[in-house]
Image (tube, grey):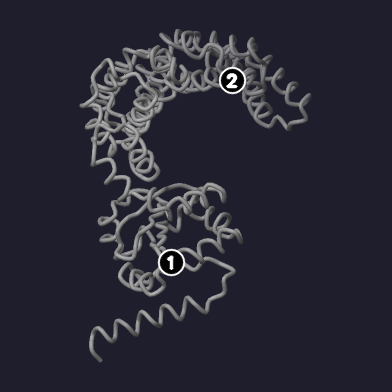
């Protein structure tokens, strides 16, 4: 049998197989890109690829909910060849490399030649999923068209914005920086403050050291006037999260220190507070309790003094990882303040534990009994209080037990 005839037979068999399947579910064609493309040409439909992993909870959830919806099933089976690819399956490397797949679930819309038309990611609900699937069918909202329109005139802010917004749906923002940077290179300072430029900045710029980012940082009030201070702050926060989150829980202190210094150049109170939290997380992960306690001591009253949850987390870490009285007494003052703000079972119990570590056994017993009473009033079992109280009473017995008499 000649190769081209064999290929035609395979394509017809695939078409026949998927044609006779009931329309009560979405059928994942996992036969491979080449055969999926042949099937798409036969059916004259674009391809909708879902890249997933079997262990990914978001992939499982969207398969069990959105992709089981009758309206979604009908729309996808009518308009697309629906294909699937297991991200971790052997042989998937060439596909992941070709389409630069880094996360899952990733949804790709391809034409019958395998050219990417659209991309989006995440566990989407029915309405959002259908909206994106419908947008991807519109030629003037597809990536090749938007890219061509942008490249005709890179000074056109509207076209740049539309292209960036489409790209942002499925790409890392770092990959969008060069496009936004090219546009802003042609914008003079006196023309920077505009609604279009804000949208380009917020969708396409994450490089805090870039000229455009520094300009927004210096001119926060001007941009807040055309959007809002909250949105300006949200943009700053997102940039710092994107910069620090991947490294904050690693042992790479040198890189964290370097990137933190970049984040610190953003002059906004919300960033100072965010950096405080990241510092604590980083030092906790690295078990550098000396620096952890130093950062907490210097900044707890400045950034989280009204947050009982944050105070309790800090006190718990200091208490567990300290044996010196100054650190323990300082943490005791913090938990006392937290309990004054809002008395809670875990707060009272934590105060008892700090007192126990300071060897103030009678005081610790009193607070443990208070915690137990609190839990009883709330209808809880209070097992933690019972366990702590038993330990404290045993310690008290040992402490008051008379020393054995020595023989003369």
State whether residue 25 is above or below residue 264.
below
Of label 1 and label 2, which has the lower sequence position?
1
State whether residue 403 is above or below residue 2.
above
The residue under the point 49% across, 50% down is 58
User: In this rendering, would 303 be left or right of 158?
Assistant: right
Q: Which residue is mark 2?
A: 350
Nearer the observer, 161 or 209: 161
User: In this rendering, would 355 be left or right of 6?
Assistant: right
Q: Quadrant of the C terminus?
A: top right
Residue 117, percent across and down? 35, 54
Residue 350, percent across and down? 59, 20
Nearer the observer, 64 or 56: 64
The residue under the point 32% across, 49% down is 145
Residue count near mark 1 (Cα–Cα under 10 Å), binned few <14, some 14–19, many ≥20: many
Q: CA distance from mark 1 to mark 2?
A: 58 Å
Q: Foreground mark, 1 or 2?
A: 1
Q: Which mark is residue 69?
A: none
* Residue 407 can be seen, yes or no: no
Residue 321, percent across and down? 44, 22
State whether residue 325 is above or below residue 50.
above
The residue under the point 46% across, 8% down is 302
Q: Secondary structure at mark 1?
A: strand
Rendered image quadrant of residue 89: bottom left
Residue 84, percent across and down? 41, 63
Q: Quadrant of the N terminus?
A: bottom left
Residue closest to the far bottom: 1
Nearer the observer, 243 or 295: 243
The residue under the point 54% across, 8% down is 333
Q: Which residue is mark 1?
A: 81
Rendered image quadrant of residue 385: top right
Q: Secondary structure at mark 2?
A: helix
Nearer the observer, 49 or 192: 192
């Amino acid at each position: 049998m000649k190769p081209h005839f064999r290929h035609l037979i395979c394509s017809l068999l695939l078409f026949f197989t998927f044609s006779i399947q009931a329309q009560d579910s979405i059928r994942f064609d996992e036969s491979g890109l080449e055969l999926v493309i042949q099937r798409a040409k036969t059916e004259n439909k674009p391809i909708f690829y879902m890249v997933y992993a079997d262990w990914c909870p978001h992939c499982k959830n969207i398969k069990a909910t959105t992709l089981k919806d009758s309206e979604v099933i009908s729309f996808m089976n009518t308009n697309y060849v629906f294909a699937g690819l297991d991200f971790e399956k052997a042989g998937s490397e060439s596909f992941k490399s070709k389409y630069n797949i880094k996360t899952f679930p990733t949804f790709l819309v391809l034409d019958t030649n395998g050219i990417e038309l659209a991309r989006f990611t995440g566990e989407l609900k029915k309405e959002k999923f259908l909206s994106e699937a419908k947008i991807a069918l519109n030629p003037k909202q597809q990536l090749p068209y938007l890219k061509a329109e942008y490249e005709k005139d890179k000074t056109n802010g509207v076209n740049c914005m539309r292209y960036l917004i489409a790209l942002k749906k499925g790409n890392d923002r770092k990959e969008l920086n060069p496009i936004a940077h090219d546009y802003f290179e042609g914008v003079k300072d006196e023309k920077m403050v505009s609604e279009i430029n804000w949208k380009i900045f917020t969708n396409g710029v994450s490089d805090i050291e870039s000229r455009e980012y520094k300009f927004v940082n210096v001119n926060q009030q001007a941009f807040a006037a055309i959007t809002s201070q909250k949105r300006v702050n949200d943009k700053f926060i997102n940039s710092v999260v994107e910069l620090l989150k991947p490294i904050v829980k690693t042992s790479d202190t040198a890189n964290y220190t370097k990137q933190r210094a970049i984040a610190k150049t953003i002059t906004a109170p919300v960033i100072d507070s965010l950096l405080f939290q990241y510092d604590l997380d980083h030092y906790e992960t690295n078990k550098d309790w000396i620096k952890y306690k130093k950062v907490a001591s210097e900044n707890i009253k400045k950034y989280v003094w009204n947050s009982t949850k944050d105070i309790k987390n800090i006190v718990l870490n200091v208490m567990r990882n300290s044996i010196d009285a100054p650190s323990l007494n300082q943490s005791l003052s913090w938990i006392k303040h937290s309990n004054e703000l809002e008395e809670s079972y875990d707060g009272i119990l934590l105060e008892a534990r700090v007192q126990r570590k300071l060897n103030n056994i009678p005081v610790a017993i009193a607070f443990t009994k208070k915690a137990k009473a609190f839990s009883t009033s709330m209808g809880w079992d209070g097992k933690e209080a019972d366990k702590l109280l038993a330990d404290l009473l045993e310690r008290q017995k040992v402490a008051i037990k008379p020393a054995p008499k020595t023989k003369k």
